[in-house]
């Protein structure tokens, strides 16, 4: 009887601990996507700090990936310096590519929005590959980053097509409102 209660207790503890990392992965994945979305907003504002933001974001992504790899490898007792070296090389390659994109932008080959979009796509690809090789959460983050890039291009491309009908509707509603307000006012007799 004593053994059965221990095995039930061990099963419950292992069940709880298996959900804990999943919650952390989901939470961190959401944070990483929100931070990337902020980068897209900075890009749309044509901010001069966009490049610095993308570099800081890459460092955050790299540290998060390294942290998950370290945690997983320590738990499974497979931690080696070669894993860390491979992952550092993976993220360092992204930093080099983003620095080249910034250099191309400074040369006038890319505009700020194009350079930021390329940086976002490089982050998406690097995250996706980090998901393939290191931590599967980054696989989904990479896919969503690519979707964010695609949606930002679609919105920018069709913003005038979206805004023009909305502007026309707004003008018509304003005209209608002012006409009805003018008719509803009591006429003064002088």
Image (cartoon, helix red, strand yellow):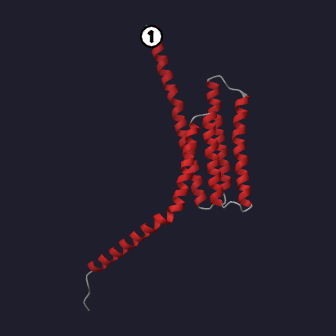
Whether 36 is drawn above or below 190: the answer is above
Determine which quarter of the picture holds residue 72.
top right
Q: Residue furthest top?
A: 1
Q: Position of residue 4 (x, y in %)?
A: 45, 10
Whether 43 is drawn above or below 94: the answer is below
Left or right: 113 in relation to 156: right
Depth check: give the residue in front, 134 or 174.
Answer: 134
Q: Give the position of the C terminus as an image quadrant.
A: bottom left
Q: Position of residue 52 (x, y in %)?
A: 68, 53
Q: Position of residue 150 (x, y in %)?
A: 55, 52
Q: Position of residue 110 (x, y in %)?
A: 68, 60
Q: Count of labels shown? A: 1
Left or right: 68 in relation to 190: right
Left or right: 181 in relation to 24: left
Residue name at image x 48 percent, y 23 percent = 15
Say which residue label 1 marks.
4
Q: Give the position of the N terminus as an image quadrant.
A: top left
Residue name at image x 34 percent, y 76 percent = 178
Q: Residue furthest bottom?
A: 190
Q: Quick check: can you spot residue 145?
A: yes
Depth check: give the residue in front, 117 or 61.
Answer: 117
Q: Quick check: can you spot residue 64?
A: no
Residue name at image x 71 percent, y 26 percent = 80
Determine which quarter of the picture holds residue 44.
bottom right
| Disc 1 crowd, CA 10 A, few/some/many (<14, 14-19, 20+) | few
Whether 70 is drawn above or below 116: the answer is above
Label 1 secondary element: helix
């Amino acid at each position: 009887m004593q053994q059965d209660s221990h095995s039930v207790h061990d099963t419950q503890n292992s069940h709880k601990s298996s959900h804990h990392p999943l919650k952390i992965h989901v939470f961190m994945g959401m944070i990483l996507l929100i931070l990337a979305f902020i980068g897209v907003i900075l890009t749309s504002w044509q901010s001069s700090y966009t490049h610095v933001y993308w570099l800081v974001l890459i460092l955050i992504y790299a540290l998060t990936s390294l942290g998950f790899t370290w945690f997983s490898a320590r738990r499974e007792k497979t931690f080696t310096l070669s894993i860390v070296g491979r992952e550092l090389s993976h993220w360092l390659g992204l930093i080099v590519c983003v620095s080249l994109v910034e250099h191309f932008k400074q040369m006038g080959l890319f505009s700020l929005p194009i350079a930021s979009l390329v940086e976002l796509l490089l982050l998406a690809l690097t995250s996706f590959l980090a998901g393939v090789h290191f931590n599967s959460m980054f696989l989904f983050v990479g896919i969503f980053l690519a979707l964010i890039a695609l949606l930002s291009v679609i919105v920018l491309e069709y913003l005038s097509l979206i805004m023009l009908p909305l502007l026309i509707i707004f003008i018509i509603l304003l005209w209608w409102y002012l006409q009805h307000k003018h008719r509803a006012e009591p006429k003064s007799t002088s």
